Image (cartoon, grey):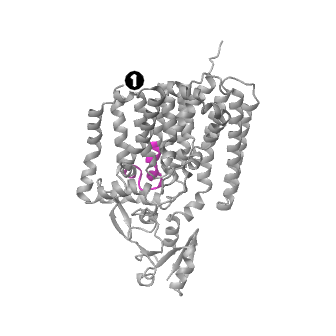
């Protein structure tokens, strides 16, 4: 009698990684409440569009009224609207499109890596992408950047595959259309800053232009692109004259070149020169340290003539290197941006790690012992970070049971990790530790979302304070709630769920607090003394995190 040996194939490993990361992300999706300003803003935009049954013009509740939101195209808002129709207007539904877009990126990346390099690169690339810090957290928010990255990834992977399939040429233009319908011409710029430097570098090193361009169906593909994009842009301009001028000039170019750029619906984020590379290191944590560990000992070789000759013979490696550096270089001297703008480079980085992993091991550039040490350090660091996060959360959420469970799970993972470290060295051991590092990183991010849920929900969102205000208000009486000096976008989204559709929310500035005739005032803690000076007889009746609830 014989027993069948269990065989774990690369396909099984890839599916297991994807399902594990997806499960952790979906379970933590409702936490915390929608964070202001951006999450509350975008969820509110989709909510108003759904209420108005308007699938053309995005709308925003701003300065006390509903008005057209001319800052972004509607594709991601359409996804949120659809999610609201299916799952209701809640945190989970608002964030679900980000998870779907991230899953799409992983699928496209895995398919491209498999077709170009094989299973090993596909598994490593998907594992690195799925467990990168920015991927996990941005896929669980209502921002547009992940859907934008999906379009760019589709285009760039299609370009790499265009020599193998003519259909890929058409998909290249479909990807561009997805990006342009998510965030405008920026999608074309971000695609171009990968392709153009790659093409010129290829021309310089290999003495020829990449053959991929000749395979693109420029005429038919352009027709497909404009057929997908132009109808909405023209319709939006006809409904909102001036939209194209504001959106194309201010939103897409002003933030990059104007030192004192101001968003019509908020404020910019000034960054020092070179901050984009530091942000990129954090965005792809913990894998940035693995890449540094692989490259720093070989820095002379990287800048040698032999390495340039290698790039000349390997246009795909040159392409993924250009993809990885595209956003950090583009933002190097930009005046206004946030770390989320680096998201389109994260899939390129993941593919680069996969390619280098395969090349370094097969060509003997890096030994398995070196990889083991790097991965061992990274895994140990992540386990330590998990423990620190769990203990730190006591300050924000004194739930000892959760902390003990987190510590116990961290110890269990550490024991599993010890198996890989102490067991006899095998050819696949480095690969196993890499997968373990990806899984532990994902669990650490999920634990972070839960550990700091209470802090973020009470200090960076308004659902809980609105619930408290509703609980202390007089029953069966129309309620007027005024937000003094600062009106969170999330308040508009959460108001129907917490204080009812009959309640009125007021946006109050200095000088009109007394004349607003509000039943309750909500003010941030740092502005409380300012309110007391304006309304000396105001009485604090409750508090929630950074918020103070006051009877005028």
Could you say where residue 294 lies in the image, as x and y percent from the top left?
65, 34
Specify the farthest residue to the right.
422
Give yes or no for residue 90 being in the magenta stretch.
Answer: yes
User: Between 473 and 198, which is closer to the camera in this rendering?
Assistant: 198
**Which residue occupies the foreground of this view, 455 or 68?**
68
Most common secondary structure along the magenta stretch: helix
Quarter-of-image position of residue 60: bottom left
Does 450 sit left or right of 252 as displayed? right
Q: Residue at x 34, y 54 (%)?
A: 248
- Whether residue 130 is visible, yes or no, is yes
Residue 56 location (% of width, % of height): 29, 54
Asked which secondary structure carries label 1, the reply is loop
Give the labeled residue for mark 1: 164
Q: Is residue 141 left or right of residue 151?
A: right
Q: Is residue 376 above or below residue 119?
A: below
Horizontal and vertical percent for residue 526? 57, 73
- Residue 20 picture quarter: top right
Magenta residues (range): 84-101
């Amino acid at each position: 009698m014989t027993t069948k040996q269990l065989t774990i194939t690369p396909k099984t490993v890839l599916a297991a990684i994807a399902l594990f990361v997806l499960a952790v992300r979906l379970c933590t999706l409702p936490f915390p409440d929608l964070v202001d300003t951006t999450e509350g803003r975008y969820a509110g935009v989709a909510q108003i569009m759904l209420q108005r049954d308007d699938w053309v013009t995005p709308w925003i509740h701003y300065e006390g009224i509903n008005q057209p939101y001319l800052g972004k195209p509607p594709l991601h808002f359409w996804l949120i609207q659809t999610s609201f129709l299916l799952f209701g207007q809640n945190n989970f539904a608002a964030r679900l499109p980000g998870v779907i877009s991230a899953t799409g990126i992983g699928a496209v990346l895995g398919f491209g890596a498999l077709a170009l390099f094989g299973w090993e690169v596909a598994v490593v690339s998907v594992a690195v992408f799925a467990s990168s810090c920015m991927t996990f957290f941005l896929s669980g928010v209502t921002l547009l950047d992940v859907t934008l990255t999906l379009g760019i990834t589709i285009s760039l992977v299609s370009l790499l595959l265009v020599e193998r399939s003519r259909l890929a040429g058409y998909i290249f233009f479909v990807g561009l259309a997805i990006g342009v319908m998510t965030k405008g011409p920026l999608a074309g710029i971000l695609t171009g800053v990968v392709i153009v430097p790659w093409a010129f570098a290829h021309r310089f090193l290999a003495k020829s232009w990449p053959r991929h361009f000749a395979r693109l169906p420029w005429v038919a593909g352009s027709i497909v692109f404009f057929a997908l994009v132009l109808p909405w842009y023209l319709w939006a301009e006809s409904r909102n004259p001036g939209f194209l001028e504001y959106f194309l000039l201010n939103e897409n170019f002003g933030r990059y070149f104007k030192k004192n750029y101001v968003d019509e619906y908020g404020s910019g984020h000034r960054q020092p020169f070179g901050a984009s590379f530091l942000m990129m290191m954090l965005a792809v944590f913990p894998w940035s340290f693995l890449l540094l560990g692989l490259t720093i000992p070989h820095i002379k070789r990287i800048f040698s003539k032999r390495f340039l000759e290698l790039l000349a013979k390997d246009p795909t490696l040159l392409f993924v290197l250009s993809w990885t550096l595209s956003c950090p270089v583009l933002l190097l001297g930009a005046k206004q941006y946030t770390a989320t703008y680096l998201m389109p480079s994260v899939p390129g980085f993941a593919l680069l790690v996969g390619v280098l992993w395969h090349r370094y091991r097969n060509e003997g550039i890096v030994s398995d012992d070196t990889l083991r040490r790097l991965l061992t350090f990274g895994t140990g660091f992540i386990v330590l970070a998990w423990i620190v996060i769990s203990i730190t959360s006591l300050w924000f959420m004194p739930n000892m049971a959760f902390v003990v469970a987190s510590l116990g799970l961290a110890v269990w993972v550490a024991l599993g990790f010890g198996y890989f470290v102490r067991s006899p060295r095998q050819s696949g051991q480095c690969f196993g530790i890499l997968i373990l590092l990806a899984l532990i990183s994902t669990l650490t991010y999920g634990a972070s979302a839960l550990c700091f849920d209470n802090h973020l929900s009470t200090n960076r969102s308004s659902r809980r304070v609105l619930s408290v205000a509703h609980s202390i208000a007089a029953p069966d009486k129309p309620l007027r709630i005024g937000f003094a000096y600062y009106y969170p976008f999330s308040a508009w989204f959460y108001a129907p769920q917490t204080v009812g559709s009959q309640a009125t929310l007021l946006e109050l500035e200095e000088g009109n607090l007394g004349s607003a005739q509000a039943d309750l005032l909500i003010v941030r803690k740092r502005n409380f003394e300012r309110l007391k000076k304006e309304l000396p007889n105001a009485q604090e009746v409750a508090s929630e995190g950074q918020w103070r609830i006051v009877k005028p």
